[in-house]
Amino acid sequence: MSQPQLNLPDVDTVVKTGTAYAKDLAERTLSTFVVAASGVGVAAGPADMFHASFWQTMGAAGVAAAASLVKGMLARAFGSKNSASLAKGV
């Protein structure tokens, strides 16, 4: 009886794929934090819509960034392995 053939990807491909995914996920997480912090900061500052302290603003941005991180991890689990996006073809 012959041994079953394993069709494993090349090591370089795996490293490049993992690196691309990590960069994509880091970029998305950081950009979500910056946008959320800016939005809450603007809303709490000049518009005076909220009475949020600096740490509440940063906490809100952190929650948004954490949600982005989880979403990116789920996208890798259920979508394209090369992207942190749920959109097809990204």
Image: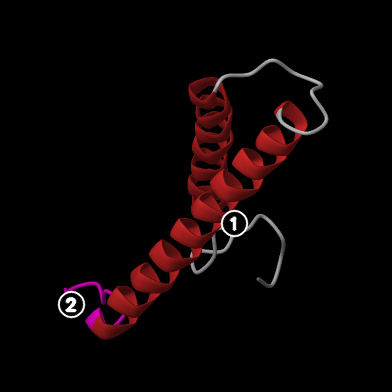
User: Mark 2, residues whose alpha carbon is within 10 Å: few (<14), some, or many (≥20)?
Assistant: few
Determine the residue positioned at 28% across, 75% down. 15
Expressed as whole percent of the image width and height from the top left, the position of residue 8 reads 29, 75
Direction front: furthest residue: 46
Q: Give residue 80's quadrant in the image.
A: bottom right
Q: Give residue 57's quadrant in the image.
A: top right
Expressed as whole percent of the image width and height from the top left, the position of residue 3 reads 17, 74
Determine the residue positioned at 31% across, 74% down. 14
- Of badges 2 and 1, the one in the foreground is 1
Residue 2, labelled with which disc? 2
In the rendered image, the quadrant that contains the N terminus is: bottom left
Which residue does the numbered mark 1 point to in the structure image?
Answer: 79
Residue 7 can be seen, yes or no: no
- Mark closer to the chain start, 2 or 1: 2
Q: Regarding mark 1 in the picture, which secondary structure is present there?
A: loop
Residue 87 against residue 47 in the figure, above or below: below
Magenta includes 6?
yes
Residue 72 against residue 5 in the figure, above or below: above
Expressed as whole percent of the image width and height from the top left, the position of residue 38 reads 65, 44
Determine the residue positioned at 51% across, 50% down. 29
Q: Regarding mark 2 in the picture, which secondary structure is present there?
A: loop
Kind of residue at badge 2: Ser
Residue 13 can be seen, yes or no: yes
User: Mark 1, residues whose alpha carbon is within 10 Å: few (<14), some, or many (≥20)?
Assistant: some
Q: Give residue 12's quadrant in the image.
A: bottom left
Residue 47 against residue 30 in the figure, above or below: above
Determine the main secondary structure of the stretch shown in magenta: loop
Closer-to-camera residue (56/12): 56
Kind of residue at badge 1: Gly
Residue 74 against residue 59 in the figure, above or below: below
Question: Which portion, as a residue range, is magenta?
Answer: 1-11
C-alpha span from label 2 to label 1: 34 Å
